[in-house]
Structure formats: C-alpha cells, structure tokens
Amino acid sequence: MASEEASLRALESLMTEFFHTSTSNERKREIEALLNNFAQQLGAWRFCFYFLSSSHNDYVLMYSLSVFENLINKMWLGIPSEEKMEIRSSLPKLLLSQHKTLPGFICNKLCKVIVDMGRQDWPMFYHDFFTNILQLIQTPRTTPLGLIMLKTASEELACPREDLSVARKEELRKLLLDQVPTVLGLLTGVLESIWDKHSVTAATPPPSPTASDADDLLSNLVHTPALAKQLSQPPPSLEAESERICALALECLSHLFSWIPLSASITPSLLTTIFHFARLGCDTGSRKTPTTNSATLNGGSSSPSLPLTLPSSQTDRDRLGVLAMSCINELMCKNCVPLEFQEYLLRVCQQTFILLQRITRETNAHSVRSRLEELDESYIEKFTDFLRLFVSVHLRRIESNAQFPVVEFLALLFKYTFHQPTHEGYLSCLDIWALFLDYLTNKIRNRLEDREGIINRYEDALVLLLTEVLNRIQFRYNQTQLEELDDETLDDDQQTEWQRYLRHSLEVVAKIMELFPTHAFTTLVRGAMKHAQSLAALQAYSHWLARFYSEVQRQNQQQFISIISTAMEALPPLISTKVQEKLLLSACHLLVSVATTVRPVFLINIPAVQKVFSRVTDNAAQRLPEEAQVLLCRALSNVLLLPWPNIPEPEQQWGERSSHHSTLLSSLTRDYRELKGSAPPQRKGQLEATKRVICQTLGVLRDIVENISSEGTKSRQICYQSMQEACQLSLALFPTYIHQSDVTEEMLSFFLALFQGLRVQMGVPFTEQIIQTFLNMFTRQQLAESILQEGSAGCHVVEKFLKILQVVVQEPGQAFKPFLPSILSLCMEQLYPIIAERPSMDVKVELFELLFQLLHHNWRYFYRSSVLASVNRDGADEPMENQPQFIAVMQAFGQSFLQPDIHLFKQNLSYLETLNSKHKLYHKKFFRAMMLPQFVSVLLQVLIHKSHDLLQEEIGIAVYNMASVDFSTFFSAFLPEFLAGCEGLDTSQKNVLARNFKMERDLPSFTQSVHRLVNDLRYYRLCNDSLPPGTVKL
C-alpha cells in the first residue's frame, strides 16, 4: 500500500470527483468499486484511522467510519484479537479528543461505531464499555457526548438487528436492564440540576385574573398543594448549552421508556422533573423570539458548541416540551401496569391534566383558541396523543379513583376539543371522545344494574358534546370552517376531507344516541325544524329520523310528516343540470337516505317526490350527471321496493308498488331495449353513442340490484320481474360486444350483481344459460387477448368473470355441480398458464379466491367419503378423486409463495389455513406425503430471506399447524433434512441449530423456536461470510 499521507490525498481527490456534478455515472461506478476493494483489504482500518485523525473532508471522514462499521458488523469474527483490542482503545480516544471539533453527524456516526463494538464484545472483551459512558455523563465537559453515547447504546443494544444470535440479544437486554436504575438516577440528576440552577432566578408572576378558578381545579386534580404550587411557577430561561443537554437527556429517557418495564426505578422525582420540562411547551406567557440562533438539539450541527451564555429560543423551549411529552407518552402506552406502579400512574395523569388546565385557561390576554394557536403544532399533537392513550389504555384504572375527578377532566377535554386551531386536531379529539363513549357503553353493558348511576354522572357533559358536534357540521353555525374543507380530493381511504369530517362527527353522534336516545331525538328534531335546507346535515340525521319515525308511528305523526315534507319540498328546484353539482348530489343523497333508511309510508304521496319521479322518467328531459342519475333511480326504486317499517305484510301494497316499479324500469331501459336484435354500429360515433346507452343503463340497473340484494324475497321478486327483459337482452348482446372491453366489463358487473342478489329469482335454467355462454366465450385465445393486449381494462373483464364463477361454486345443492370440471379446466389449463409468470397481480387475486372457494364449498368433489367414515379414519386415509386437478391447484398455491407480492402471499396462506381448519387439508394422507414438506420448506425459506417480513407471525403459525400433524416426523426427519440442505453453514453450526430447536409442542414455544432458528441461521451465515479466505474452522 502507498503511504498514509499519499493515500489520504488520493482518497480526498476521489471523493471530490465522485460528488462533483460533472462526474459521469460510469466513472462513479469505477470509483465505488475502487473504494469497496480498498475497504476489503486486510489492515485497511489503520489507514482509515489515520484519515479520521488527519482529514477535514466530511466525505473522507464518513467513508472511513463506514469502513470501520463494515469491519465490526460483518468481519469482526475474523479479525485478530490484538487488532480488536487496538481498535477498541483507539476509537474512543479519538472521539474524546476531537468530539468538539468534529461535525455533529460525524461525531454521532463515530459514537455508533463504538457502540457497535460494545454490541459485539461487552462485557467479556470490552468490560469498561458502559462504565465509560456513565463517566462521560458525570463529567460536565463531556455530558452531551455521554448522552449521545447512551441514547445510541439504548437504540442498538436493547433491540438489536438480526446480525446477532438470539442468545446474544437476550444477554445484551439483560445487561442493559441491570444498568437501568443507575442510568435513570443519572438522568434525573442531570435534568434536576439544570432546572434547579435556572429556577432560582425566575421571576414571580403577577396573579392571574382567573387564579382562583385555576386553584380550585388544581386542588381537585392534585391533592398535593406543594406540587400544584410548584407546577404553577413560571418556567426558567435556559441558555443554549443547558437546553441542548436537557434535550439529549429527554431523548435518552424517551427511548429507554420505550423498552424498559414500568418499575420503581422510575421515581416520583424523575416524573416531576419530566413534567417541569413538559410545561415549557404550553407556556405562552414568555414567548419571545430571539434574534440569535441556538445550537441544534441532537448534536447534529456541524458548527462548534456555542457559548454557555447564549439564550435558547422559544423554538428550543418548545422542542423540550415536545420531548418531555414524548417521554410521558412512552410511559402511557404501556398496558401492563404493575400494582406498585399504580400510584405513579395516577401521579402522571394528575400532572398532565394540570398542563391541560394551563392550556385551556382563559385570561384577559388570551382566549383558549388563541393560546392553542400560539403553541407548537408538534406539542399539541403529542398532548392529544397523551389524551388518547389515557382514555384508551388507562381510564378504566383511574376512573374509580376518588383522587381523580373524571367529570372535571371531561370539561377540560371539551374546551380543548372545540378550540382546536386545525381540522386534523379537532378530528383527533373527536376520536378520543369516541373512545370514551365506547368505554362507557361497554361499562354499562357489563354493569347493567349501575346503568342509571353511570348515565346520570355523564349526561350533562355528553348532551353538551352532542349539541356542539351537531353545530359543527351545520353551515348555519360553522360556515367559515366548513367552507375550508376539500370536497373533491380523495385520500387513501377514498374519502374527501369533507366526508371524513362528517364521518368522524357522526360516529360520535351515533355513540351518544345509543346512550341518550331521548335527548338526542329532541336535539335532532329541533335542529331539523330550524334548518331543513341543510341537506347534508339532514342526510346525516337519517338513521335517527328512522328511529324517531318508529317512536311516533303509534302516536301523532304530524310533526314528523312536517319535517320530511319540508325537506322534500326543497328537492325539485335542486334536481337540475343548472344547479351546482355539489348541491345537486347533496339533494340526491338526502332522497336516497330518506327512502332507504327512514322509509315513511307517505313518501311517494308527497308532491315534491312525485315531481322527481316525473323528472327521472321523462326521456325528453336533459339527462343529469351520471352519479346524480344513479342516485335518483336508486332512491325511487327503493321507495317502491323496500318494505315499510312496522307495517303488516298484507298492508304493504305490493301489487300497486310492483306496477309503479315496472313503469319506472320500463322508462329507464327504453333506449336500451331498442338495441334488441341489432349489431354494433360500424361508424365510430354511432358505436360510442350505443356503448354509452348500454353502460349508462346497466350502471343504473346494477345499482338498483345491489341496493336490494339483502332485502326480503318480495322486494327481490318485484325487482327481477321489472328488469327480466333487460337481463335477457344483456345476455343476447354479450357475444356481439365481447371485444369491447368497456362494455363487456359493465355487462359482467351487471351479471355479477344479478348472481349475488337475484340468483334465486332468475331460476336455474336462465342461470345455467348465462354460465354456459360465458364459458363458451372465454376461450384461451379470448383470455389472452383480454389480459395481454388490452391492459388493465381487459384484466378487469376477466376479474369480473372470475367473481361470477366464485358465486357459482359457492352455491349449495347440485344444480351447478356439473360446471365444476369446466371451471377447473378454464382456471388451470387456460387461464393459469397465461398469468403464472407475469409479475403483475392482475387477475391472480381473483383466480386464487375462485380456486379456494371451489375447494372449500366442493370438498366432496375430491373426497367423496361419508362424514362418519371421515371421523372414524380421522380424515387421513380418505380415498381421493380428481387427483390431477387437486395437485395442479395445490402446486399453483405453492408457486404463489415464491412470488414477491405480499398481499397475494397473505391471502393464499390464509386460504390454506382455512382449508386445514375446515377440511383437515394438512392431515390428508396424499397431502402429507406429497406436499407438506415442500410447503414447510418454502415457508421457512421465506422467513430466512426476509422477503415477507410483515407476515412473520402468520407464517410461523402456518408452519406450526403443518408440523403439528406429525411432530415426531418434523423433529426427527424434516428438520435434520432441511438443515442438511442449507448452504453457507458448517456441520457444527447445523448441529447447534438443531439442538437449540426445542421439541416443545405448544404454539408459543414452537413459533419462538422457529424464529430463533431463522435468526441464528442468518447470523451464522453472516459470520461465515466475514471470515478471511482460507480460514480453518474447527
């Protein structure tokens, strides 16, 4: 090798060239190869140590540390012990001597490399690793460095990556837990000393205008006046270096709390200190923005440390508040609370609600909303997280405690909720109320004898909540904020911001309705009578209007009739192409809600509804936008098809309603029925117009069918009678439009709705005719054309076809059993070869669901023996039929586990598990002999390669269920054979893996052994890869 100085200059030159904008990608790859080759050379670390000591080039420093990191994590086993000792001695000295001048990110990386050595060698070969960290923290000039080391140690040692054996991971965790009391004591001391030092000079605040109210509430929340007074003192002003140390200490605590158990080591003194810092985020009295920048909180600044006298900014103080709340939330999210920690938990809740009281206190200078607007957004998020954790995890522990007044807490939460400055903040608070209402509902359900007492305790608060939530969704009360909501852009859940806002609000309203129906009805009716033009709000109230209708049917209905009539009168002027679409759709949704949910007998007799009926059936009228047309047709169909509530069957007037429904559908399908007997037009313009008629008509009919599919027999009979002609016409047109994928998809969607909702009404002959037509049309050539040539549109056509077949194979009885051979042939001989090797998941999900449903609902197609015979033989030796088709299906399932798509993997694994639980698949003699070892082997390899890590638990359970068929064979034959075939391991390592796999037969122990096997096998391979070539292993 060249001299160290020459190597440094060459490396700096290469790094500068690599990151220069004019360097080509090809040259960058050449430089990368050079650097990688250099890093692999024996003794390269000595050069890198020189680079670290001598260079000021950030790229060179980072590269040098990456060489050390690779050496320690991947090659450490093959390094001579004397060199390891030299590295363990040299790097900490380098850190200690240069940490004040090194850039922050380099310093952090160097800390990580040293911790990596501790991860490998502490305590056996690096006995003073943790002692050195503690000494750094205790020495004032190196306290920040020690805290960075401590946090890194907690991150890397408590939950290490997979590159350690399970035994070593367990050892490290135990070693760290032994240090926890000492560490927490040190951190408490660091934070207390800084707080106390700066609190001495804090000024006494003037009395608050609402101090007496505050004191009353504080005395309720905290039964220790000294603590309440202490927490009421103004926060101190910290200089930048103290603030940085406090931030690092709180970051350490937050990470420690994420994994250590709750115990007496978390002392009241530590909790009180954390709450002192949490106050910094909610103090609005001293918010002044300094003109001088401060040091960064996490040691990441590339500039040297700032003078101790420089004051911290309000942003830094907010950051401390956020970090302190993170610590509190880490404690709160632990569901397992030891008995001895219950008192501490109460103290945490009491102290946090003192902060809540401070946040929601109104003064002459601040309203609650203005105070919340001034606070840091991250602090508000953390505080809301705390409230959510308190209600969801700990309320059941705290509510009955006399020292914690829950009703007063709800009053504070109410103020906090309805003064939130952002929509997201408000919705998060509504989620907390929903959790509280769920808790209350479950409590009442479990303690029915206490129902009245529980209801009375919370009635006033929740009725007030109901009123305010309802006001927030009405423009009359909340126009400014509602107009800010986006009603067009869809989120990941396919909801607009407006829909999400409404859904959150109505979920809370619904939960209150369950508890206080009388109050809720009164509030709703009063609101509806005042503001019947608020269509969105009325639509939201439809469920409660239905209950109100049920209540008043036996009494005077006039008030209710007036509400509905007034609302309906608002509709005709809005159902027009000249009206803004948002308002048009609100009117349509309102009619749908009333027709579907409320179902009043008198609805069809209201003149306004009759006007809408005429508008829809008048072919001369200009057609409404597609969504509005579908909604109106659904509403009018439901008016005629859905049974009226609490009306005897003879009084349902089915004959008259059936006649009206036939008239409605005859009008809606007039243009469509004119296509009977005609071929598709040749001219493009005419063809598009015809296709538009087909798609629009079938879209309306499909929606009508889908919305009555779960109704009674009479409703479905009338529906099918009205559209029978359209159904037969659709089947006749299908072959002529088979090459028009958009039309074919709409037709198949319509037939799918028919199969799902009106299968009985269609009758067996017509259903058989449909299935046979489809099977004849979907040849292998047609399937290939749809999937390979037409892209996603063609794939959707095939998927719809498969969905129809899914319904067919699930049908009980013998009517459709003759189609099973044809369906299996279509799946495995025609369709599967086309899609098997395609990376796209198009069609695969639906195909495998069809195969699963076919197996699940037609098991006797493969195993015909009687139930009694199956029980007597335990299902293992049943004679099998149609074996080649069964093998093909199982092989397809096995092949799917080798593909990268995690959704398909999860789906198919759950299907196999269901077949086993319902039909004892794994126990069948044929499956055990021919397929079970292959499936177990594939699943273990998936775990080893970490290709589907999110499914670790599901895969472990599946392996257990397969092994449990014959544990003796698994332990004595399969496991040794599997390990013998594993590459990259020596014989002794394979023997250790086999010995460590405990032969226990309960699920938790077995899956733990599986994951230990996978982890240690990966670790051994990593170790073997790190040894120098030619190493002799004994």
Image (tube, rainbow, N blue to C red):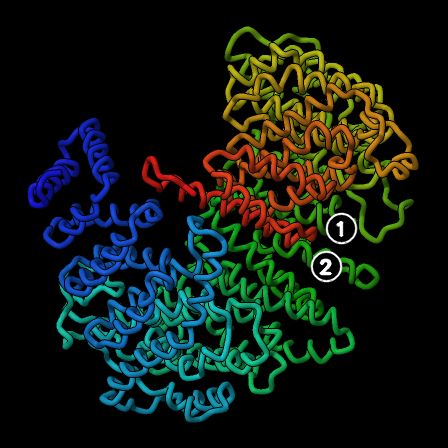
- Mark-to-mark CA distance, 1 and 2: 10 Å
Q: Is residue 928 left or right of residue 46?
A: right
Tag shown at residue 256: none
Say above or below: 977 vs 137.
above
Of helix, strand and loop, which one carries label 1?
A: loop
| Rendered residue at 16%/66% (across/down) | 293
Q: Amino acid at mark 2?
A: Phe
Q: Which residue is mark 2?
A: 560
Q: Could you say which disc has been placed on residue 600 in the image?
A: 1
**x then y, percent, for residue 959:** 64, 42
Which quadrant holds the C terminus?
A: top left
Q: Quadrant of residue 276?
A: bottom left
Quarter placement of the N terminus:
top left
Q: Position of residue 214 (x, y in %)?
A: 43, 87
How crowded pointer 2 is (Cα within 10 Å; few <14, some 14-19, many 20+) is rated as: some
First in sequence, mark 1 or 2: give its number: 2
